[in-house]
Structures are given as C-alpha cells and as structure tokens.
Image (cartoon, rainbow, N blue to C red):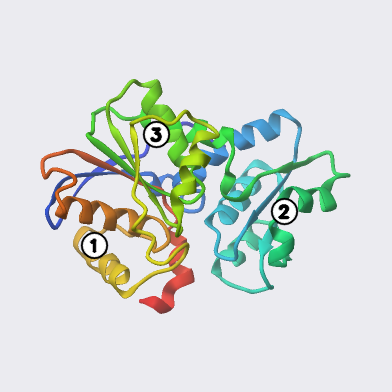
Amino acid sequence: MFKEIYSPIQHIKFASLNQLFVKRDDLIDPYISGNKWRKLKYILAKAKAGNKTHLVTFGGAYSNHLVATAAAASRSGLKATAFVRGEEVKNEMLLLCSLFGMKLMFTDRESYRNKPELFKQHFADDPEAYFIDEGGASLEATIGCAEIINELTETYDHIFCAAGTGTTAAGLLGGIQQNVLHTKLHIIPVLKGGSFISDEIAKYTPLSNHIELHLDYHFGGYAKTTPELIDFIKAFTSRTGLLLDPVYTAKMFFAIDDLQQKQVIGSNERILAIHTGGLMGLFGMKDKF
C-alpha cells in the first residue's frame, strides 16, 4: 500500500517570511499523513517480511499515530491493537481507530510506562504479533523520514522540523549527511526539557554540526498551549490557508517566525519547513479556539 509518493513543496508568505517553503507531507494521506506515513512505510514492510499479521502499538487518546496505524493495518489486511494511555474515553480519534478495526486496550499510566512488558504480558504467545513503539520510533522510521531529503530538487539554507521522539529529526539528519548537504537542520522539541532529543537522534544517526535544537518553543510542554500560540495559529492559517496543529507544527512555525524576527535567520535565506501532518490533533484542543 505504500507506493512511492512525493509530497509537493509550497512557497508560503507570512509576515516578513518571504523565503519560506513548506514540504507538504500533510497532503500525503488524510489518515496516514505526514511523518506517520514515512515512519510506517518500512515498519510495515519489515512486519510483512517476518510474516507478522498483527500490529501492536501504543499512544494517547488523541494520538495521530494510532489512527495512522489503524488505517495502514486495515488497508494492508492486518490486525491492529493499541494500548491507549489513561482511562477509557471516547473521542473522534478513537472512533476512527475503531472504525478501521483496531482493538483498543486502555491502560493505566504506570503500566503504560513499560511498553515491552505490556506487549510481553498480552502477546508473548502470539507469533504473528509485531511490536511498534509509541509514535513509530524505530530505525525503519528514520529510513522513511530520510527520504524527505532525497525528494528535494532545490537547496535550502535551513530545514525545520518539530520533534517529539526525535525519530523524524534523525531521519532528516541522516538524509542531509547522505546527500552531503550544507543545510542546517533546526529541531523544535515540543516537550519541556527537550534537550534529550539529541540523545534520541544519536541512537540512529551520528550527531554533527548540521543540527541545532531550539528549546524555548514548547509553550509549557507536550500538548500544552498558550493564548499566544493559539492566536498565532489563527493568524497564520487565515493568511496562508495552511492548517497547523497546536502540538507540533504550530510550535515549529512560531519558532521560524520568531527566529527571523530576531535576525537569527536572514531575511533572504531559504527556509524549508517540514509539515509533518497531525492535523487531527486539532480535535483534542477544539475548546482552545
């Protein structure tokens, strides 16, 4: 099902950003969008090569990864189960998971911390079960994300991406190194205290002077927002027509705008922002708007 797809690049003008280009991975698929498609591409290939027919993964109640995995499993003729962090709830995201045929297992937060143990407890006797970490974090995921760089036909001074686990960033860095580019990769951790992202990237890709982490754009932490960020989303989307999610991409675009205003990035330098999808995350914060 993961045929070759190349997402378009769109030139966006916002405020003083005249050289901002966006890799529209959010357009790849409505349910397996952005970096989720990139990550799952080779994960599913490895699962099928190992004759695994049951995908088992993990996520929160508003996880785009769960929806993407459920959709990918359904289209591939595979079973899917998800351990969902926290008490049992109903929402738009989990409805989609269920409609795609995914079994949901709500799990208390303490048990959820040890994902390999959860998998072992419930699926040790299932030879067809395949473990997929939260967010799809894996070597296979970085290989898929590295292909973003391979698809570029022009050069950019800066590439930006938001980071939760660091998997996408590791893939992008690997792609930059493989293609011997001089582009600077800017990583925007969306969690408070996101310096650990460097260690996560290093698990897959050797660190280099190609990367720079910006730790001050988390807006309080993962899935946290402020009125300033919400106002930015409203202004950005109304002026560009480009939807952002409050968890990842909004924080990245805010950082780009702020860094250029502070002249950390020159007004004539070419910027490529990776739109990693995740737009259904808006449903989890509809009360903020």
Q: Which residue is mark 3?
A: 148
Q: Amino acid at mark 3?
A: Ile
The location of residue 273, given as percent across then percent down, is 30, 45
Q: Is residue 217 visible?
A: yes
| SS label for mark 2 | loop
Look at 55% across and 69% down and name the residue there.
Answer: 92
Q: Which residue is mark 2?
A: 114
Dot 2 or dot 3: first in sequence order is: 2
Q: Relative to 38, does residue 101 appear above or below in the rendering?
A: below
The location of residue 240, given as percent across then percent down, is 21, 58
The reply to whether callout 1 and callout 3 are in contact (CB within 8 Å) is: no
**The one of 184 and 289 positioned closer to us in this rendering:** 184
Dot 1 or dot 2: first in sequence order is: 2
Q: Amino acid at mark 1?
A: Phe
The location of residue 138, given as percent across then percent down, is 59, 38
Q: Which residue is mark 1?
A: 236
- For residue 190, side relative to residue 216 (left or right): right
| SS label for mark 1 | helix
**The one of 129 and 184 positioned closer to us in this rendering:** 184
Quarter that holds the N terminus:
top right
Q: Based on the displayed image, in which of its 4 quarters is residue 97 positioned?
A: bottom right
Q: Is residue 150 visible?
A: no
The location of residue 37, given as percent across then percent down, is 50, 43
- For residue 69, side relative to residue 212 (left or right): right
The reply to whether callout 2 and callout 3 are in contact (CB within 8 Å) is: no
Select label 1 or label 2 by which is in front: 2
Q: Amino acid at mark 2?
A: Asn
Q: Relative to 189, does residue 221 appear above or below in the rendering?
A: below
